Image (tube, rainbow, N blue to C red):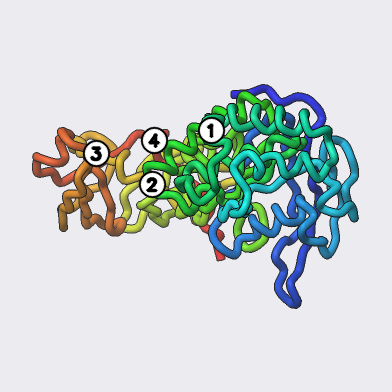
Amino acid sequence: MKDFTTEPMLEVCDVVHKYGQVTALSNVSLSAQKGEFLTILGSSGSGKTTMLRVISGLETPYSVGRLRIGGEDVVGVPAAKRRCTTVFQNYALFPHMSVLENVAYGLKIRKLPADDVIREARRALEMVRLEQKADRSIRQLSGGERQRVALARAVVTRPAVLLLDEPLGALDERLRQDMQLELMDLQRKLDMTFVYITHSQEEALTMSDRVILMRNGRVEQRGEPLELFDRPATRFAADFMGYENILPGRLIQREGDRGQVELTGGARVLGTLAADDLAVGDRVNMALRAERIAPVGPEDQGLDGSLRSKVYRGKYTDMLMDTAAGPLRLRSWHGAPAEHESFSRVGWKETDAVIFADNDV
């Protein structure tokens, strides 16, 4: 993990933005360090793209406590004069220009000497491995190549912050995965601050140094990718991060970050507390990933039940088990015992079960 100890390259405090009577951002704050890959994650309507537009200057916020880019106060500064560039999902390339002309455009409007413009544009194309296609028409490029041209055009002006608005959304799955690796490599080479907008938890977990999960114009949870993946703090965060099982219960014992929960039906099981303020007697939820549940013996902690269904999905098999605590979803990868054996009890490691307050509305 990178060590970020300097003054933030991007600092946003208490942004409020409204569209008529609808509040799109409600006192949202965030920061990003130099060289950090920060991802803002959320579903449609969560406020993530509005935040990006406020940072870039494409939206004027209803109110803002502080907005600084590269140490400079940019509140009220037009978009063209801010030290940030945006890469959009639709690329926004000029179809009548060649690849090189597209990349050089931002430098030309800054009135740099012609030789410098061409040299820097070719250097940016080399960075995204498209130097051999500099003279091609945009129409002659694949979707992935067009995305790399858009990236080259964005970084050639050397902004303090690069904003990326779901840039891989239009690509197929394999190309999207390849582009994730290319983006990570480019960001490391440039040591540039990236602020990446996405609705895909896979993209957020793969590429980010930190993730901010948004919901209804507010920050739901923030932290390193592994923290959000393994320690969701709310039911919404657990749902969004792909937890298939969320079981209601009551906290009956706690010791440090270890808790015991009495689930519906009376079973008492162990898990890890997501917050320090949970108290014995609180209503809680226990979240479990399907792939981290496995058959266990009668002496192990877990739940008894009966298998209702098995669905083969190629790389793995999904199963549904009826228990007193409710339906439980399991996932077994090829060759695992659960695929081939009958069983009537399943369990999990206590570090794989996350306990958080049952207070979602």
Q: Secondary structure at mark 2?
A: helix
Q: Is residue 280 left or right of residue 165?
A: left
4 or 2: mark nearer the eye: 2
Residue 157, horizontal then vertical, whole percent: 75, 36
1 or 4: mark nearer the eye: 1
Characterize the local packing of mark 3: few (<14), some (14-19) or many (20 or more) Cα atoms within 10 angstroms.
some
Q: Between residue 154 and residue 332, name the one nearer to us.
A: 154
Q: Considering only order in the chain, which callout, 3 or 4, is on the residue closer to the N terminus?
A: 3
Q: Quadrant of the N terminus?
A: top right
| Above or below, 249 relative to 191 | below
* Amino acid type of the residue tagged 3 in the rendering: Ala
Residue 101, horizontal then vertical, whole percent: 66, 42
Q: Is residue 141 left or right of residue 14?
A: left
The residue singled out by tag 4 in the image is: 350
The residue singled out by tag 2 in the image is: 173
* Residue drawn at point x = 31 percent, y = 45 percent: 290
* Amino acid type of the residue tagged 1 in the rendering: Leu
Residue 315, horizontal then vertical, whole percent: 22, 41
Q: Considering only order in the chain, which callout, 1 or 2, is on the residue closer to the N terminus?
A: 1
Cα separation, mark 2 vs mark 1, equals: 21 Å
The residue singled out by tag 1 in the image is: 130
The residue singled out by tag 3 in the image is: 294
Q: Secondary structure at mark 3?
A: strand
Q: Between residue 348 and residue 109, name the one nearer to us.
A: 109
* Cβ atoms under marks 1 and 4 closer than 8 Å: no
Q: Secondary structure at mark 1?
A: loop
* Amino acid type of the residue tagged 4 in the rendering: Glu
Cα separation, mark 4 vs mark 3, equals: 13 Å
Cα separation, mark 1 vs mark 4, equals: 49 Å
Q: Quadrant of the C terminus?
A: bottom right
